[in-house]
Image (tube, grey):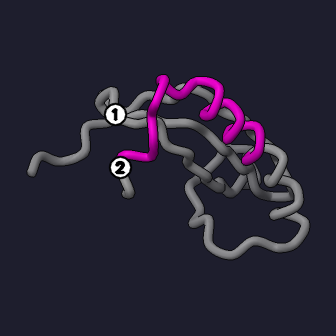
Amino acid sequence: MPGFDPALDKEIFSEELTLGQFRFKVSVMSYNDGAPKMQISRERMNKEGEATFAKLGRLTLEEATAILPMIEKVKKFMEENAPAGAASEDPE
């Protein structure tokens, strides 16, 4: 099986939010023109203001409350842009 090729990974839509020392991003991604999928990521902002990857892991109530509207917006985008008759075809 071939490895992951970042050139084939496309961001279709995204929303970002900075909360404290973290930046959260909820996006719709499509790999190799496959089924669009929601991705939720967290980045830690260092003292220089640069973002570095951080595991999403557990969320505080404040974080969950802040990103839920972004999740709903991305979900709506996916529903409105789904091909006719499309169902969740890829369980990954």
Disc 2 from disc 1: Cα separation = 9 Å
Whether tag 2 and tag 1 are in contact, CB under 8 A, the answer is yes
Q: Which region is colored magenta? A: 71-89
Which residue shows up at 42% across the image and 33% down it? 30
Q: Position of residue 51 (x, y in %)?
A: 64, 47
Disc sitting over residue 78 in the figure = none
Question: For the C terminus, which image quadrant?
Answer: bottom left
Q: Is residue 10 above or below residue 53?
A: above
Q: Position of residue 70 (x, y in %)?
A: 78, 43
Label 2 sits on residue? 90
Which residue shows up at 67% across the image and 45% down it? 25
Is 72 within the magenta?
yes
Label 1 sits on residue? 34
Depth check: give the residue in front, 50 or 28.
Answer: 28
Say which element carries label 1.
Answer: loop
Q: Report whether 23 appears left or right of 78.
A: right
Q: Position of residue 60 (x, y in %)?
A: 82, 73
Is 73 within the magenta?
yes
Residue lying at the far left of the rendered structure: 1
